[in-house]
Amino acid sequence: MRIRMITAMPEGATRDGEPWPAEGEEADLPTTVGAHLVAAGVAEEATEPSPKTGRRKAAAKGVDDGADGGSS
């Protein structure tokens, strides 16, 4: 299962001798481990690539440019 960490693990925490991914990084884990992290709110399932910085702002820009169509 591919997950994206949404919470940083404690400093020095390891899994099978390897450090956990940093917050925002993705990793492939066994399904049971990944599902547990998702259920605990520590990670989310990474079904699509990580969002790029500023992508949400660009997508949201122009959605509502302040014109409501009403009269004053």
Image (cartoon, helix red, strand yellow):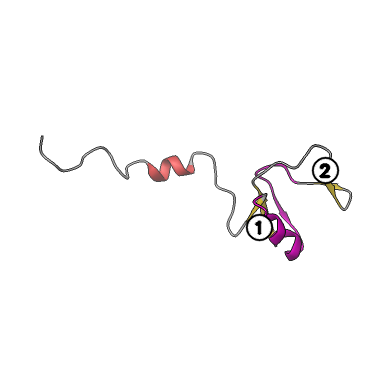
Q: Position of residue 16 (x, y in %)?
A: 87, 53
To which residue does mark 1 refer?
Answer: 39
Q: Position of residue 46 (x, y in %)?
A: 62, 56
User: How busy is the neighbourhood of tag 1: few (under 14 within 10 Å), some, or many (20 plus)?
Assistant: few
Local SS, label 1? helix
Q: Position of residue 32 (x, y in %)?
A: 75, 64
| Residue drawn at the location 71% of the way across and 41% of the way down | 8
| Residue drawn at the location 65% of the way across and 44% of the way down | 24
Of discs 2 and 1, which sits in the foreground?
1
Q: CA distance from mark 2 to mark 1?
A: 19 Å
| Sooner in the amino-acid sequence: mark 2 or mark 1 | 2
Local SS, label 2? loop
Q: What's the residue type where badge 2 is placed? A: Ala
User: How busy is the neighbourhood of tag 2: few (under 14 within 10 Å), some, or many (20 plus)?
Assistant: few
Residue at the extreme bottom of the image, as rendered: 31
Residue at the extreme front of the image, as rendered: 40
Magenta range is 21-41
To which residue does mark 2 refer?
Answer: 13
Instruction: Say which quarter of the image contains residue 13.
Output: top right
User: In the rendered view, would you say 3 is above or below 67?
Assistant: below
